[in-house]
Amino acid sequence: ILLDKDGKRKHTRPTFSGQQIFALEKTFEQTKYLAGPERARLAYSLGMTESQVKVWFQNRRTKWRKKHAAEMATAKKKQDSETERLKGASENEEEDDDYNKPLDPNSDDEKITQLLKKHKPGG
């Protein structure tokens, strides 16, 4: 038993065995929340207190939510960049339409020069 400077019992962090963590993770995959009787059975079978199982599940849900939020943010960034890429491609297609149209006899040389430069091979 550890004591703090005032002689009171000091809380120590429990260390769980690999087997306990494995069983907790397997249970968490099946259900994110445990009802009282399920928690009591799991705690008993793993040689843990109900409180330890309860706190482990609370912490694991927090970790799971953070990971899920990060994955959602990454997926949104990927979707946004793909949307931008497609948007840019459609703008380029519109510009190509200008190039493929017959020239307006009244258009100025500057516009013709710009179109030719933009679509010059290797340019």
Image (cartoon, grey):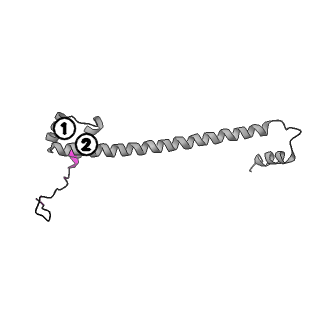
Q: Amino acid at mark 2?
A: Phe
Q: Amino acid at mark 1?
A: Arg
How far apart are the alpha carbons under marks 1 and 2?
A: 10 Å
Q: Is residue 11 magenta?
A: yes
What is the chief secondary structure element of the magenta stretch?
Answer: loop
Taking the image as shown, residue 75 lies to the left or right of residue 48, namely right
Q: What segment is highlighted magenta in the picture?
A: 1-20
Q: Is residue 120 left or right of residue 14?
A: right
Residue at the image point whose x is 82% and y is 45% from the top: 111
Q: Which residue is mark 2?
A: 57
The image shows residue 65 at horizontal and vertical percentages of 35, 43
Q: Is residue 65 left or right of residue 78?
A: left
Q: Quadrant of residue 85?
A: top right
Q: Position of residue 32 (x, y in %)?
A: 28, 37
Query: In which quadrant of the rendered image does the N terminus lie?
Result: bottom left
Q: Residue furthest right?
A: 105
Residue 39's disc number? 1
Please count the marks in the image.
2
- Magenta span contains residue 120: no
Residue at image position (28%, 35%) is 31
At a point 45% along the width and 44% down the height, the residue shown is 73
